[in-house]
Amino acid sequence: MIRSLEEARETVRQKRQELQRRVRETCIITVLLGAGGKGLDNRRKIKEKLEREGVLALIPEDDFAPDVAPSITEEAVLEKSDVDVIFINVESWGSVTEFGQFHDKERIAPKLRVFVPYEYHPLIWNFHGVLDRLVSDTCGEIWACLRS
């Protein structure tokens, strides 16, 4: 039981310090997927920013074994490791294929966060292109709900 205002302040200060210590000890692991070329450069910049904030960010092209097929390595790491979140920037057929490959995997799908450039976002524009075709082919039920 807290007896005074000073005791209350001290209790709050101690709890805050404990939470700060626990947050510093927690490591969030994320994987950044998307297009190569300029997209890869952008992912590297995002990785730098995330790591400054204490988030471990992985880019398959830089951090996974180059002598093993990327699709095998990516699936193994994303499905069986301690990865917390997977960001995928859908801006090319390659990244659409990655999304299609992972969207129905029970241990991967809940971790997926998909980014789509504004000009191609199917919920904003009545655009029938790459993402629209992928979604209608691979996750029609979800897409039908989102579009209605």
Image: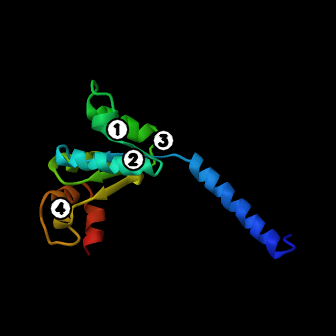
**Residue at the extreme left of the image, as rendered:** 128
Marks 2/4: CA–CA distance: 21 Å
Characterize the local packing of mark 1: few (<14), some (14-19) or many (20 or more) Cα atoms within 10 angstroms.
Answer: some
Residue marked by disc 1: 75
Label pair 2/1, CB-CB below 8 angstroms: yes
Q: Position of residue 15 (x, y in %)?
A: 71, 61
- Badge 3 element: loop
Quarter of the figure with residue 80: top left
- Residue under label 3, please give it: 82
Q: Is residue 79 left or right of residue 65?
A: right
Choose top left, top right, bottom left or bottom right for residue 18: bottom right
- What amino acid type is highlighted by mark number 1? Glu
Disc 4 residue crowd, few under 14, some 14–19, many 20+, Cα 10 Å: some
Reading the chain from its start, which is encountered first: label 2 or label 3? 3
| Residue under pointer 4 | 132
* Front label number (3 vs 1): 3
Q: Which residue is mark 2?
A: 108
